[in-house]
Amino acid sequence: MKKSILLIPMMLLGMAVTFSPALAADEEKGEIVFADVGWDSIKLNNAIAGLIAEEVFGYTWTEVPSSTPIAHEALINGEIDVHMEEWTDNIPSYQTDLEAGKFVELGINFNDNYQGLYIPRYVADEYPELKTVKDLANYPELFPDPEDSSKGIIYGGIPGWEVTEIMEKKVEAYGLDQYYNYLLPGSNAAMDSVITSAWDKQKPFVAYYWEPTWLMGKYDLVLLEDSPYDPDTYQDGIGACPAVTVTVAVSNSFAEANPEFCAFLSNYHTGSALISEALAYMQDVGSGATHADAARWLLTQHPELIDEWLTGEQAEVLNEALAGGGGNASSNWLTEFPLVMKPDTNAIDTAVRGFAVAASPVLDKIQAVLSGLVMAFKWVLDHIPWFVLLIAVGVLGWKARGKLRNGILYAIVLALVGVVGYWDAMILTLSIALASVVLALVLGLPIGILISNSEKANRILRPVLDTMQTMPVFVYLIPALLLFGLGNASAVIATVIYAIVPVIRLTSLGIRQVDKEVVEAAKSFGSTRWQTLFKVQIPQAIPTIMTGVNQTLMMAMAMVVTCSMIGARGLGMEVLDAVNRVEIGRGLIAGGCVVILAVVLDRLTQDGSAAARMITRLTRTSKDGGARGWKTEIM
């Protein structure tokens, strides 16, 4: 009997394995992991190859988000199976790794792309003499840097790409660094936003860009001419960029285990015009279009590709699937209900971009003020000798913590940032953080005081604060980027929105926690509402308020580093560049400097008792009767 009972779960397990389609498919084919390095063209290529993998070969597939160098390393390690767009010139170790047999190159996806410095057509038409890269030396005032009025600005490539460094060398080789600042956008999305925002406002810009992309298909951009490509001088930035060979590559293990699918990938090829055509289709359709839709549309429009890539039998299977329409539908059961509608995100994008254009004069002034605030902090910090700043940190640490050795330790640790060569980057990061914190306190403290004394205001603002505190931090980068462009102004806006919540909440909490009997006593001595607030409630709430200030400062530090993705310079850009280039040592050192700065600032603002005693002394009055007779004692 016992043996029979034990056999039941074993039989059920066997049936589950036998009849589970997913497990059976995994044993035969499994799931293909494609690299997704962020841009639309690779997402489209993944969708095309993934569609064929599903419909013809019976695989499932997924994408792993990454960056160019990290995806390449993952391919070598077998963590990614297929990379549909290996931009060979942007991966310094590509040829070395290929010759070492670390991965398998199956063929060329496309090699008819162009890259370099572009200007919009409306600028080229208005300034016909501006034809070459060297001609930029005559027009720095046409492309002003909003954060440095003495120079223009050239938007460079994505951090971590080899061509980004080559473009920077080009700026130096042609002497353009005398007239321009070279700014890295931080991400592909940030670069797209810069170009689309400038185009909407019909503003001049000069930026590195490449083909194929939806943006190149949608906007008329003019490639500035350069001297002919010379492999001997190209690495030094002299000469035009060659068309990059973009290959299809797979991991060694995948190539060995999946020869039939790899045979298809060996035949796979597209072209800049084809990809741009499909991506433009997505833009024209709107927010409802996916890369999978674009893949089906492209194969329907160009059936000759199917015959070139697949055998006759395989092509017949794919054509039947395309004729059938939807393919493997999404399992989202909500879409089955007729009342469920997908939000029209294009309408939101259009509204925000329209607002940015309409409010451009005001937004430009706000950008100038915020950039000026950051540069003011930077100017002050730059003009303080490094040893004076370290002494000041030591003294503040001693007074804040009550122990001399703590102050000395903070000064020594902060000095390490200069020792490793990141002092200037730290000063810029600190400037952005301080500007953000000052603005957050100017706005947050009054709001905290308001909701502490008004239940109605508290009920209205509480869900807003909840939303601000739980919203993914990257969401704040998008509107800041669209409205204020790349740079410090956008970083300040995004940081303030993200970091303002703690000071509002803790200011309100501190005032609400003041003993009601103390408040009543103050009123009984004749204190007005404002006198009670500023001479009783706020002084006694200072420790809690200072905790809010501390948390706001820490969140600002974290966000400033994240804002490197929208062009904020400093330590964050060093970390982002190191991550994109998979430079572990550089990343650890730059990240360690961020930690040092954050820890020092945390320790200097962590204890609110010292600040409480100081404010108490400032607000203490003599006992001479009436409203002035109330004397505040905290400690």
Image (tube, rainbow, N blue to C red):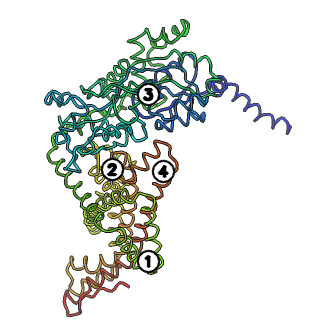
Which label sits in the foreground, 4 or 1? 4
Front disc: 4 or 2: 4
In the depicted view, which residue is nearer to us: 632 or 140? 140
Q: Is residue 86 above or below residue 108?
A: below
Amino acid type, residue under disc 3 in the picture = Ile
- Asked where in the image residue 336 lies, by quadrant, the reply is top left
Q: Residues within 10 Å of mark 2 (few under 14, many from 20)?
A: many
Q: Quadrant of residue 605?
A: bottom left
Q: Are marks 4 and 3 in contact (CB under 8 Å)?
A: no
Identified by mark 2, the residue type is Ala
Of residues 368 and 380, the one drawn nearer to the viewer in this rendering: 380
Q: Which mark is residue 401?
A: 1
For marks 2 and 3, the one nearer the N-term is 3
- Residue placed under numbered mark 3 in the picture: 42
| Mark 4–mark 2 distance (CA, rounded to whole Å) | 17 Å
Q: Earlier in the sequence, mark 3 or mark 1?
A: 3
Q: Secondary structure at mark 2?
A: loop
Q: Earlier in the sequence, mark 4 or mark 1?
A: 1
SS at mark 1 in the image: helix
Q: CA distance from mark 2 to mark 3?
A: 27 Å
Which image quadrant: the C terminus? bottom left
Residue type at mark 4: give it: Gly
Identify the amino acid type marked 1: Arg
Please report the residue visible at 35 percent of the width from the left and 24 percent of the height from the top.
279
Quarter of the N terminus within the rendering: top right
**Tag shown at residue 568:** 2
- Asked if the residue at tag 2 contacts the one at tag 4, i.e. Cβ–Cβ closer than 8 Å, the answer is no
Nearest to the observer: residue 283 or residue 536: 283
Is residue 293 positioned above or below 493 on the image? above
According to the image, label 4 marks what residue?
587
* Disc 4, SS: helix
Q: Gap between marks 1 and 2, in whole Å?
A: 32 Å
